[in-house]
Image (tube, rainbow, N blue to C red):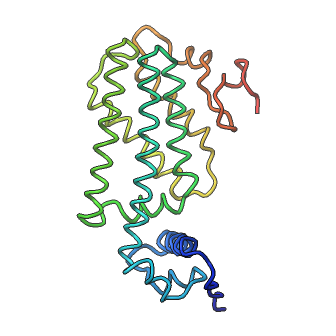
Amino acid sequence: MVAPKASPRMPAEKRKEEIVQAAKRTFARKGYRSTSIADIVAQSSVGRGTFYLHFDSKREIFIHIIESYFDGLVSLLDQNHKAMERALAEGGNTMAVWVENLYRMLVYHQQDPELSRVIYREALGMDADFSNRVMKLDSHVRKMMRDELQMMLDMGGMRDCDVPLTASILYSSVAGIIMEYIVDHEEVDVAYLCNSLFAHHARALMPVGLDADEVLKTADVFVGSDGRLGKPPGEGGATS
């Protein structure tokens, strides 16, 4: 059955967004190379001519989707980095900030699984243009993580380590969780992933002499199903 075409009165931005959403669905399902403009149009309520009013080619709309991912992620990472800088400068609860930042990162990918699938399954390593965008973001993330770890180390908040190597290990663990548990799964318990991943990070980085598991039991750094921090179940926290 042919999809109904958009009304001429539909605002241009709404038509453009409909095309973008249709493209994300199609790229996520069929892959970039197997997708045609006809496929994208068929998934929307606009005609082929309307598509070309907004995008010159399949590649252009693909780049638009990739850039929207980068813009959103960089904004989130900058917000997370500023929160950690404030906590470190003001003597705040860096553990709580760390787990909140991690949770926001996972939720960002879980909220738009089609976009995440396009990025991780299609854009990464696709060609030099896309790879340069990925490398630029990658460098940005790694620098922020190195800066945060160095500040924590300088303040005695973590055990002595090779900061650049540790940043790479932490970064890779988060990316791995996103790829394995979020990208190809519509339903995922993000709170559980966040708590488990953070616990491993804390055990690896906590200063020598502290029992990480005991600290985690009493600290308000357990993410509940509502995304709020508190103590874990059985330690005065929620039981659900």
> For the view shown, which residue lies furthest in the left direction?
128
Residue shown at 36%/73% (left/top)? Answer: 60
Foreground: 31 or 209? 31
Horizontal and vertical percent position of residue 130 = 30, 62
Q: Quadrant of residue 18?
A: bottom right
Relative to 109, is 209 on the left or the right? left
Instruction: Please identify the quadrant where the C terminus is shown.
Output: top right
Count of labels in the image: 0
Relative to 204, is 18 on the left or the right? right
> For the view shown, which residue lies furthest in the right direction?
239
Foreground: 51 or 136? 51
Residue shown at 27%/59% (left/top)? Answer: 131
Relative to 159, is 108 on the left or the right? right
Q: In this view, does 125 lie above or below 53?
A: above
Horizontal and vertical percent position of residue 198 = 50, 30
Q: Is residue 150 above or below residue 32?
A: above
Horizontal and vertical percent position of residue 13 = 54, 71
Residue shown at 54%/58% (left/top)? Answer: 113
> For the view shown, which residue lies furthest in the top direction?
209
Instruction: Please identify the quadrant where the N terminus is shown.
Output: bottom right
Q: In which quarter of the image is residue 129?
A: bottom left
Foreground: 19 or 223? 19
Horizontal and vertical percent position of residue 45 = 61, 82
